[in-house]
Each structure stands twice: as C-alpha cells, then as structure tokens.
Amino acid sequence: MNVHTIKNSKLSVSVNSLGAELCSVKNADNFEYIWQGDKSVWARHAPVLFPIVGRLKNDKYTYDRQTYSLSQHGFARDKIFILLEHTENCLEFELTPDEEMFLNYPFHFSLRIRYELNDSSLKIKYIVFNPDNTVLPFSIGAHPGFNCSNLSDFYLEFKNTRDLVAQKLQEGLIGDETYIIKLDQRRLKLSPELFVNDALVFKNMQVDELTLCSERSTHKIKMTCTNWPYFGIWSKKGCDNFVCLEPWFGIADGLNSNGNILLKEGIIKLGSYKTFEEEFCLMFS
C-alpha cells in the first residue's frame, strides 16, 4: 500500500495512490475521522467515482453505435494514480488511461486529484482535462465515509432550512418517484433505519453545506460543496458505524434510460482540450 501523508499542528492526512483515496484524517489527539474500511462491512474509505457516478442500467452504455460495460461508480477507485506533487501541505495525483480502460471507456483523459491542507480544513479538487479532439463524456463524485461509533447518536445539520426531496431507488437505479426528508430545525437524525432502502439521493443542488455532529462528542465535520448538482447520503444496510456524505457531478441511470452516454442525466460533455475543475472542502473539529 503506497500511502502519502501531509500534516500540520491540527491534522494528519493520508492518501493512498490506489484510487488517490483519502484513507485517514487524524487530529492532534490521534482521533480518526475517516472510516477505516472494515472488509466485513465496507472495505473502502473515500473512493473517487469516475467516469460514472452510481450504476448504469444493466451496467452498460452505448457510444458511437458500440456497447460498453462499466461497473457501479466506474474504475478510477481501483487504479493506481501517479503522485505528481508532495509538499508540506499538498498532495496531487494523476490518472491517465491504459489499454484496459480503453476497452470499456474509449476516451482519452487526464484526471488529477489534489488535496490541500490548511489549518483544520482539507480542500479536495478534481481536475479533468480532455486531450483529444472528440467530446469527453464523464461524471465524477466523492464518496467519503466518516466514523460514527453509533449512528443513532449522530445527526446532520444543514445550511438550508427547507425539507429535502429525495429520489426513490430501485436496485441502484433512479426511480420515477420522490419522497420528502423532513428536517427538524435544519437537522436530520441518523439511524440505520434511514438506509434500509439504499442511499438518500438528492438532485437540483439541494445540498451545498452540511455538518456531521454527535450528541455525545464535540467532534464535527463540516462539508462545503457549492455548485455540486447532486448529493448522496449512504451507510451500509444494517451498519451503524459510518456514514458517507457524497457530492456528485453525475447520478445513476434512471429506470427508463436508453443507455446513450451522451444523453445520460448529469453527464458532463467536456469539449476538446478543455478542463473541468471543481472542489469541495472538509473542516474538522
């Protein structure tokens, strides 16, 4: 395991070259904020979702009259990234395609992921470049898991005061129905029962700032993700030890998807020699 670490007086942050995955954030008292990947529950920490977010209908898509296969959330989380930069407060990684990737994703790209540590905050930036003369269709998202010793002791506090509208999921695909997630004074109490029907999925930029809080601890994690159009909240069914807070540029296929990746909801169509850049920030206390 090739893990790289940056630190200051407040935090120590570690990232694995496999998937450029954030795998640890500890404070000065050695308190661990990131889920440590119990293989019997969920083996990951904070995977990067690329070139799709969520599941494709039948795990397939079409492009230029050809059919290709991609598993849920794409392949980037299982690929080795090259370390481009390692300074006192910054790590930057890059992934470019190899022949194996081309078999089911016939596009040239550069995906860079940058981690910048400043005091008690960590900024995570995604940079996608299209080096080709054809459109690059992709989605990208974050999937960080945070430790919760007992999920029912935790709640999410949202910046907004309005109730949330969630999408119903059917076997990982977006259904036709929605339902209301009611907030109590901007708070949503967490529990394993909240996730018995899979993740909570929100469209239309409903979530741009929220804080994970505990009723039994002063530790908090604030996430700011302005401009991210989709957001997911997930924990493994039956588990009460972690929760994932997930800003996305992209979303799973709908039940009625026709499979054309250029028409897929939430897909970014990056023009030739253009760059996509977006970031979100985590503040730990």
Image (cartoon, rainbow, N blue to C red):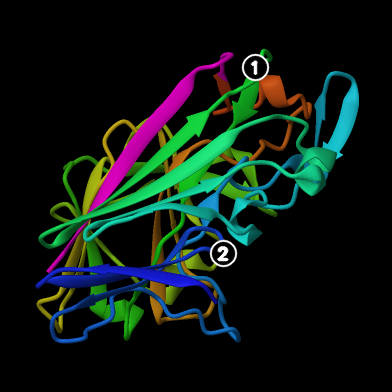
Q: Nearer the viewer, residue 247 or 5?
A: 5
Q: Is residue 80 left or right of residue 70?
A: left
Q: In the image, which is nearer the foreground, mark 2 or mark 1?
A: 2
Q: Nearer the viewer, residue 169 or 180?
A: 169
Residue 69, visible in the rendered structure: no
Q: Which residues are magenta?
A: 270-285
For mark 1, what is the residue? 135
Q: Is residue 195 visible?
A: yes
Q: Is residue 285 left or right of residue 87?
A: left
Q: Which mark is residue 63?
A: none
- Where, quadrant-wise, is the N terminus in this rendering? bottom right
Please, what is the dominant secondary structure of the magenta stretch?
A: strand
Q: Which residue is mark 2?
A: 18
**Who's the residue at 33% across and 43% down the image?**
164
Kindly indicate whether the residue at mark 1 contacts the one at mark 2 (C-beta within 8 angstroms). no
Residue 115 to residue 138: above or below = below
Image height of 261 relative to 251, above or below: above
Binning the other alpha carbons within 10 Å of mark 1 as few (below 14), some (14 to 19) or many (20 upward) gives: some
List the single residue furthest toward the right: 66
Badge 1 amino acid: Val
Measured as percent of width and height from the top left, residue 225 is found at 28, 42
Q: Nearer the viewer, residue 91 or 230?
A: 91
- Residue 87 is drawn in which quadrant? bottom left
**Mark 2 or mark 1: whose residue is earlier in sequence:** 2
